[in-house]
Every structure is written in C-alpha cells, then in structure tokens.
Image (cartoon, helix red, strand yellow):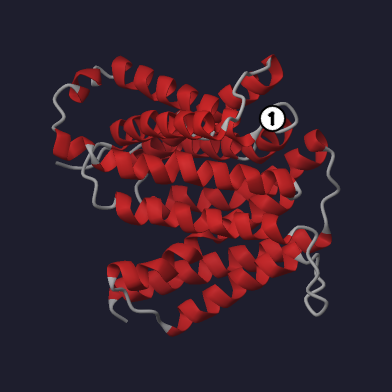
Amino acid sequence: MQKRTDQKKAYLLGLAAVCLWSTVATAFKLSLRHLGPEPLVLYASLTSATVLGVILAVQGRFGDLAALTWRQARFSLLLGALNPFLYYLILIRAYDLLRAQEAQAINYTWAITMSLLSIPLLGQRIRGLQFLAIGLSYLGALVISTHGDLLGFRMESPLGFALAMGSTVIWALFWIFGVRDSLDPVLRLFLNFCCGAAYTLVWALLAGIPLEPNIPGFLGAAYIGAFEMGVTFVLWISALRLSRTTAQVSNLIYLAPFLSLFIIHFLVGEAILVSTLAGLGFILAGTVVQKFADRQAASGS
C-alpha cells in the first residue's frame, strides 16, 4: 500500500510541534518557582496520560488497552521508570541548578549519548566521523558549562552539569530499549506516563516530599504535560507519517533550540550568553556530523 503524503500539512504539523517544544525550557524554569521537581513531574505525567488517553479515545483505540496481554504491557513498567520518572526528575533538577539556556542546550547532546550507548547495547561499531561528532558535541557542552573558560574549567554548578548530562543517558536508554517495544507509539507512551506517575507518587510519599500543588505551579505542570509530553509528540509523529521523507520534517528540529533561547530571554529574563550560543553551535554541528555518519553507515560506504 502506497504511503499517503501531504508535505504542506507535514511541515505545518512539524513546525507546530517545534514551536511548542521551544517553550518547554521556559515552562520548566517558571514552574520551578512554584513547585519542586517531584510534584512537577507527577502532575505533568498525570496531565500527559490524560491527554494521550483522550487522543486514544477520540481515535476509537482506547479498547486496545483491554486487549493487551501482560507480556505486551510489562515492558511499559521498565520504560515508565526511565521516562518520565527518572528522566524528568533528573532533568528538572538540572534546570533548578542551571540557567534554562544551559540546561536546554546541554540536553541536545542526547543523540550523541545514544550513539555511544548503542556500541555496548546494540553491538554497533563506531566510525571515524562519529569520533568527530562526539568531540564536537561534548566540547559544546563544556563550553556552555564553563562559560567558555575551558582552561580554568570552573563551573557555576558541577552538580547541575552532571545531572543535565546524566539525563541524556536516561533519555538515550529509553529510546534504545523502546526499539524492542512493538506497541503503537501513542499507546506505549500512555502506559509509560501512567507508570511514571505511579513511580513518582510512590517515591515522593516514601521520601516525605510534599505534593500539594498551588495554582501557578499546577498550571505550569499541566502545560508541560500537555505540550512537552503529550499533544506535541502526536503532532510530530503525524508530521513524520505525512512527509515524503523523514529528513524533510526532522530537520525542522534544529530551529527549536534557537527559538527556545529567544523565549527564555524574554519570558525568563536571562541574558543569552555568547558561550551558550557557541556551545550550542558545537553541539548541533556534532549532531549533523552524526547524522551524516549514520547515512554513510546505512549505505555501506
């Protein structure tokens, strides 16, 4: 059966997703003024599960849940522990310690982290260009975290940097393990967020962390749940399915970090540092080199 394409609609959906994702770093930082990481992750996860559940119901696929076997559903217990539970708790703690511009830029190294983890976990080989990609991306992360003072190697928050880098490991593991999951992506994410919300609730109760929301914090968490974790993912998947090629839409993602910096500057009030722009440039250059290396590997050249 021939793939149905609508390139104009694919671009519109892709741009909508990118624009929404570009607001999330700002939403993290503003929401953290009112809620701690645990309640923020809990209410965002519950919102995302609700949004995805509504989408499944509107599509007439909510009944698919009842048809799932334990073998099909149990993988979501693992994936839900990685994302949203561990990933967002670690990432949001990084946002709490770093400038929003720094945390969001460092987070873009996840693609390189995934390539590195694919070597031991998937048995993939590393090639010459991939060394260049790794070097560029991690150099960019260091430029950002040291504000360009690579020789002095002084960081405002070493813990924040470690958490931001650690979050990329969790995110990469989530996608590597998710390759083995044959469930529909929307259904799988719905289960992930249901499980992740349960893990967050249990963790907060055991640790004695208060979960009472206030109105500004809850609204921020609901926004994050809907537009970082829920609707935006469906928009992006729809754009990829309607596009003639994946690359035509996926290249739009390079707009996100720069749009994000613009929004951070005007809504959070951060002055955008030259070191952030330079470091982000290195990271994105590394990602482009990595994609080129992947295409070379796929073509056998």
Number of dots carrying numbers: 1
Tell whether 149 sits left or right of 143: right
- Image position of 116 with respect to 17: above or below: below
Q: Which residue is mark 1?
A: 31
- Image position of 250 with respect to 124: above or below: above
Q: Nearer the viewer, residue 61 or 220?
A: 220
Quarter of the image with the N terminus in it? top left
> Which image quarter: residue 196?
top left
Asked whether the viewer can see residue 9, the reply is no
Tell whether 255 sits left or right of 8: right
**Residue at x-position 46% and y-position 50%:** 250
Q: Amino acid at mark 1?
A: Ser
Q: Position of residue 3 (x, y in %)?
A: 23, 42
- Image position of 137 with respect to 220: above or below: below
Quarter of the image with the C terminus in it? bottom left
Tell whether 110 sits left or right of 190: right
> Which image quarter: residue 71?
top left
Q: Nearer the viewer, residue 29 or 291?
A: 29
Q: Position of residue 62 (x, y in %)?
A: 25, 19
Q: Nearer the viewer, residue 189 or 241?
A: 189
Tell whether 157 sits left or right of 112: right
> Callout 1: 10 Å neighbours few (<14), some, many (20+)?
many
Asked whether the viewer can see residue 132, the reply is yes
Identify the secondary structure beneath mark 1.
Answer: helix
Q: Nearer the viewer, residue 130 or 211?
A: 211
**Residue at x-position 36% and y-position 67%:** 118
> Which image quarter: residue 148?
bottom right
**Residue at x-position 39% and y-position 50%:** 174
Q: Position of residue 37 (x, y in %)?
A: 62, 36
**Residue at x-position 39% and y-position 56%:** 173
Q: Position of residue 260 (x, y in %)?
A: 68, 43
